[in-house]
Amino acid sequence: MNDNTPQLNNTTSLLNNTTSLSFSHRRQLLELARSLEHKMGDSLLPGDAEAIRDLCVTAMNRHDAPYDAHGLPKAILALKAAVLFTDSIDHDHNIIIALLLSPLLEDEIIDISAVKDKWGEDIASLLVGVSAVEKFSNKNNAVNQDNFRGLMLSLADDIRVIIMMTVKNLTLMREINLHPDQHWVKDVAFEANYLYAQLAHRLGLYKLKSELEDLSLKYSNREIYTQIAHKLNETKRSREAYIKSFIDPVKKKLEDAGLKFDIKGRTKSISSIWGKMKKQKVDVSGIYDLFAIRVIIDTPPEKEKSDCWLAYSILTDMYTPNPARMRDWISIPKSNGYESLHATVMGPESKWVEVQFRTRRMDLVAEKGLAAHWRYKGVKSDSTDQWMNNIRDILESADAGPMEMMRHIKMDDYEKEVYAFTPKGDLFKLPAGATVLDFAFRIHSNVGCRCTGAIVNGRHKKITYKIANGDTVEIITSATQSPNQDWLNIVVSQKARNKIKQALNEEAQKLANIGKELLDRRAKNRKIDLDETTLMRLIKKNGYKFANEFYSDMASEKLDVNKFLQQYQEEIDHQEDVTKISAEEYHLQSAPEDDPKSKKDVLVIGGKSIAGLSYKYAKCCNPIYGDEVFGFISSEGTVKVHKSDCPNARNIRTRYPYRVIPVEWSGKTGDILSANLRIIGNDDLGILANITSIIAKELNVNLRNVSIDSHDGIFQGYLTVGVSDTTELNNLIKKIRTVKGVKDVVRI
């Protein structure tokens, strides 16, 4: 031990010091201090020794609170955490000092300024991070697990703080067995399982993760834990001996076959066994892989599959395999890239053992690629994975010391998010820069729409206040509050923005409905029949692109409803002056000379030919030669020919009787015109081919368009055919009806 070792050899005065710290705890404190000094060895710096001495002396001499609120000795917990860190991870003196100073800072024996002056900025920042995380750790039971993990990561700012908190949590878990406050113990176990065990797993701290999960199961369900431990009925030494007895003969056979490999064996943890028991709904004896062996083969790429199968065949020659448990992810890898060959065999003493065969490349992909251990084992992936993977690599391979490298790693991803609590302890994640208004909409749309402000950490704040990590926010609402356009400039979350727009649109629609109802009521009072076409034209003439905007302005009295109705009446009167002339007086437009219709004499008006006049066949009813028809003179002077039973005939005759003219066919077959047919039948194979075949055989009929729909075995088709008259069309319909499976054919 170097010269910087604290002077703790003379223990008599310290042990006999009359403090409220028990004698056994004083002895334990000094033993831990010596153990830590010994473990640190040459890495012990003058500052490290001073920190250990300060912690011990302070703990020995204080009379107020050497124990925490749950009766645990603070200084001993700090020293145990430091020892655990040196044993499991690294000898980094900054983290060790921060762990030792943490209880002194918590009890305000020292402050951050003193830490900066005496120990430096780095240790001070670690302590600030730990304090920030510990501030919220007691709220974990009420919050979303992923959100709480995100809050902790964003508050920590430094990955080393996460490692420190994981070590502190495991230290605490080791100390609370049989603690009288079982409710608190279960809370700690819950936090250890869903938070720290998951983070330890992602960091590659598998031993810490496994112990955290085992202790969590022990404290939350002691009966199950004891039952599994009892049924295993083996000490660690005997289990390791069993694995060795299994591996040795397998290893020899593989070596005899000329394979180069590493072989590792392990026994699953109690928590892992319990997880499999629940998933498979069996007891311990039904778990096939209590013992797991992994064989990692060194072989070139071209021999990967053959060598894995060779090793597999050697194993299954030695031990009886369970075919139902064989998993071949070499021939067909998992979707995440995982490749391995799994076999479950009956080992010595009739115990099932799972053996995994993979090459060095496959193992690398499984551990550090898309199929990294925490992914294919079912641990939920979140935004921590990417940088956690990098940290894990540093922990495993850093030459200069992993903690030294981690000093420069910041968790920038979490600068994009903030986390805030409700008064009940619910935790919500929001984008960075989120305001009180964002938080209100995150809770519920109705809360957001009625938000007038908030009480943040006990102080009143406006809706524009930007949320900080860890804030406790109580939203204030009012029944008279409603969203306005300015709110879109306050919020940053897409959810809040969408809800505000939706609320504004709904409000605008309500106002528009009121305006429309007002206009309809006033028009009815003045006995004005509103024509939709004229109304829309007049709305656009008044500068409105959308009708809802017009109705909203009318409801809010920006427009005078009586003045608008007067304008509407004037528009109607003007139209009547222009259009209310008899058909005989109406000026018919002549067809262009190059119009082929002008050369044909297929229609007559009152016995007079309309050849040379401009006319069109109405698309709403598609008249063809032979239909009963009438003419309607459009405002452009063009005659539109409609079927007498046209869907629009009644409306035309009622509103514009003075523009209807008698029209009939001249007796000469005219153009090939379109007719629409609807065919319904069974969806039989070849029915459409049979129908189109019939149409193709008709000399003066051509198929112009086909639309097919089939549902629940019923065929429905819409056909457009070109025919010269109704006789040809009726003949075609009769022939189509003879097709097998056709139930009905109608002209539409």
Image: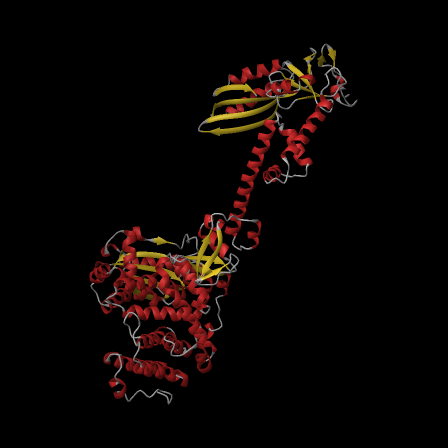
User: Would residue 440 be found to the left or right of residue 623 on screen?
Assistant: left
> How many marks are shown on the rendered structure?
0
Q: Position of residue 156 (x, y in %)?
A: 44, 68
Q: Position of residue 33 (x, y in %)?
A: 32, 81
Residue nearer the viewer, 365 or 169: 169
Q: Which colour scheme appears in the figure? A: secondary structure
Quadrant, the N terminus: bottom left
Q: Is residue 537 above or below residue 482?
A: above
Is any atom of residue 700 visible in this view?
no
Quadrant, the C terminus: top right
Is any atom of residue 744 visible in this view?
yes
Q: Quadrant of residue 707?
A: top right
Q: Quadrant of residue 86?
A: bottom left
User: Would residue 655 be found to the left or right of residue 592 on screen?
Assistant: left
Residue nearer the viewer, 234 or 478: 478
Q: Which residue is located at x 42 percent, y 68 percent? A: 132
User: Would residue 365 be found to the left or right of residue 318 on screen?
Assistant: right
